[in-house]
Image (tube, grey):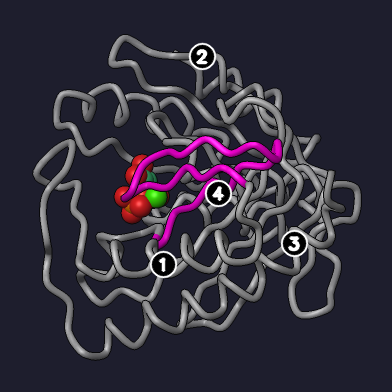
Amino acid sequence: MPQPADLESLAIDIAREAGELARRRRREGVSIAATKSAIADIVTEADREVENLIRERLSAARPGDGFLGEESGAEQGESGVTWVVDPIDGTVNYAYGIPSYAVSIAAVTGAPVVGEWRAEAGVVFNPVSGELFHAARGAGTWLDGERLAVSAEPAEAGAMLATGLGYDPATHEGDLARIARIMPMARDIRRIGAASLDLAFVAAGRIDGYYERGLQAWDHAAGALLVTEAGGRIGGLDDIDGFGRRLIVAAGPGLFDELFRAARD
Ligand code: IPD
Ligand code: CA
């Protein structure tokens, strides 16, 4: 099996190149190519082009690996490593020119199934801010040479939280009720619009806790490793609601249990 650090450094190089391409395409203008699960769930030409670039680079460097990407689907490998890729996480931000989007690349081993795989390396790169968060299993989470740690305990004023809302209007009532349940523990709440960045910010201690229902594998594969390698906890992945949406909860050990209880239906 390859070393996690080798997978990490390959993912770093490819994420940088992919992020720069996304940023260049954004400057040239973006058009929406199609809608997916719901009218609000969109894909741009850039999402597809960036995923193709990542896929090509990975298969040139490690031809035996598997691939699971948001735009181009799954391909089984024979090496035991699968790359789980979101070329542009935060596509709606990207389409509207809001600079909160990221390339998310993870290498996992074992069955490429949420809750079963073991994450070996993860990278989340926002090409607009230039921030590149990265982790390799057992070696911590890093940003610009600085080792990151989740917040130990929320401040007395309450927890700084983040969440996301489902694209399907049928889910809004439940999601908003959950926010109402959670607000008493919050100092404030953010809807950043890119799950990979929400998770990276938990890892960095910028946000005390994050939860969302309905994430796909590629939305959280890299970010969840950033959180656990920074001393945080991830949970809820086996909790599926009536709409088939998986829960994810991410927080430091001081907040996790309380947030998990409140975020669950
Ligand atoms: C979305 C973002 C968003 C989250 C959605 C995701 P996409 O990913 O991460 O924050 O609320 O659940 O689908 O579609 O922009 O890659
Ligand atoms: Ca995504």
Which residue is tagged 2? Answer: 239
- What secondary structure is marked by label 3? helix
- What secondary structure is marked by label 2? loop
Tags 3 and 4 in contact by the CB under 8 Å rule?
no
Which mark is drawn over residue 101? 1
Which of pointers 3 and 4 indicates the residue nearer the eye? 3
Which residue is tagged 3? Answer: 8
Drawn side of residue 166 relative to residue 133, left or right: left
Which residue is tagged 4? Answer: 187
Which of pointers 3 and 2 indicates the residue nearer the eye? 3
Label 2 Cα crowd, 10 Å radius (few <14 / some 14-19 / many 20+): some
How many angstroms separate mark 4 from mark 2 (CA)?
A: 26 Å
- What secondary structure is marked by label 1? loop
Which residue is more in the foreground, 71 or 90? 71
How many angstroms separate mark 1 from mark 4 (CA)?
A: 24 Å
How many angstroms separate mark 3 from mark 4 (CA)?
A: 35 Å
Q: What is the x, y in percent for residue 29?
A: 17, 84
Drawn side of residue 98 relative to residue 29, left or right: right
How many angstroms separate mark 3 from mark 2 (CA)?
A: 29 Å
Which of pointers 4 and 2 indicates the residue nearer the eye? 2
Q: Which residues are magenta?
A: 65-88
Say what amino acid the circle numbered 4 marks. Arg
Q: What is the x, y in percent for residue 245?
A: 37, 22
Which residue is more in the foreground, 13 or 158? 13
Tags 1 and 4 in contact by the CB under 8 Å rule?
no
Say what amino acid the circle numbered 3 marks. Glu
